[in-house]
Amino acid sequence: MSEQHSSTEPTREPDETTQHSSTDDRPTPLTGEHLPQLRATLADASHLLVCLDFDGTLAPIVDDPDAAAPTAANETAVASLAAAKPVTTAIVSGRGLNDVRTRVDEPRIYAGNHGLELAWDGALAMHPAARERAARVEAVCETLETVLEPIPNARVENKRLTGTVHVRTVPAGARPVVRRLTRSVVERLGGDDLELSPGKRILEIGPDVDWGKGDAVSLISSELPAETVPIYIGDDVTDESAFRAVAPDGIGIRVGDDEPSAASYRVDSPDDVAGVLEWLGAAGVSLVTEGSATYPDQSDARHDDDQRFERGPKRWSVSMANE
Ligand SMILES: [Mg+2]
């Protein structure tokens, strides 16, 4: 929950957001012309880390968040990437861990609640401060359910470590009221422990800790071989820290309009994401496999990586606690 600036939704109301932190860094639309650049980035890698946001990235944004599902093409492409040996796939979502896991089930790693909880196979780690403040999040959500009850379609979702107020289908005239009431309840019951941040037609309530999706991506990267190229695809404000996390050596791709972003490239929609994932599954994987041909002990290295991962969750918790 370290991102507090800027919604990216063009139809937002003026008070729904603050300012972008970056100046005018607009990502380049990703076309076939850029494939040589992508190939060059992947050519020296022995491994790919493909991190994917869920809503607005794999799944189109829909009015009912419970109905969100990946496009068929994205589902197939993610499964194919997840099965590729030189690739580690991770879903990095604002949804709760258990929620997002039921919506896309192939990847080995999940980061839920904007990176506050991590899962690799059966092993789990949770940000300690977030765990301590879960009861406060719950109290805020319960109060908001009562306070927002009279407002049509205002929906409060308790995701355990964070909460979401959905305003997408709230009548436009009532949205400022929802925001005002939500801010008031979070300030009153959350004190210094919780913060409120805007997303795409949502308000996120979470622990006021300096930890977000970018930290989760860095932590996952740190568990992988040094020659790993990280790729991150996402569409919203909280994805910006992840774009920054992969920026030095990897590839950040923003889904959406031509707005300033820390991502290098952008595509228009989840349909276009499938094209990127399919390319990664074909050309990307073969480039990485060729690049790793100079490592004759690759199978042993992967085995070592697996062991390192098994020790991962304990270290993750320590890393999170030090923030
Ligand atoms: Mg998203």
Image (tube, rainbow, N blue to C red):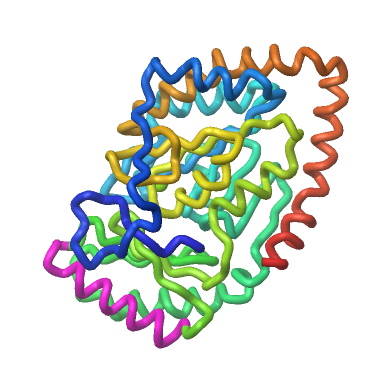
Q: What stretch is highlighted in magenta?
A: 171-190
Answer with left or right where residue 53 lies relative to residue 303: left
Q: In this view, does 175 lie above or below 270?
A: below
- Can residue 223 be seen here? The reply is yes
Depth check: 40 or 91 in front? 40
| Magenta-colored segment: predominant secondary structure | helix
Task: Kindly identify the residue that appears in the image at 29 percent across and 45 percent down.
Answer: 62
Is 179 placed left or right of 125 in the picture? left
Is 104 in front, or is 47? Answer: 47
Q: Which residue corresponds to the image point at 80% horizontal and 36% vertical from the top-left?
A: 306
Q: x, y percentage for residue 257?
A: 28, 40
Percent position of residue 144, x then y: 35, 77
Residue 38 in the image: x percent, y percent? 52, 22
Q: Nearer the viewer, residue 230 or 164?
A: 230
- Residue 189 located within the stretch drawn in magenta: yes
Residue 187, by quadrant, is bottom left
| Membership of 176 in magenta stretch | yes
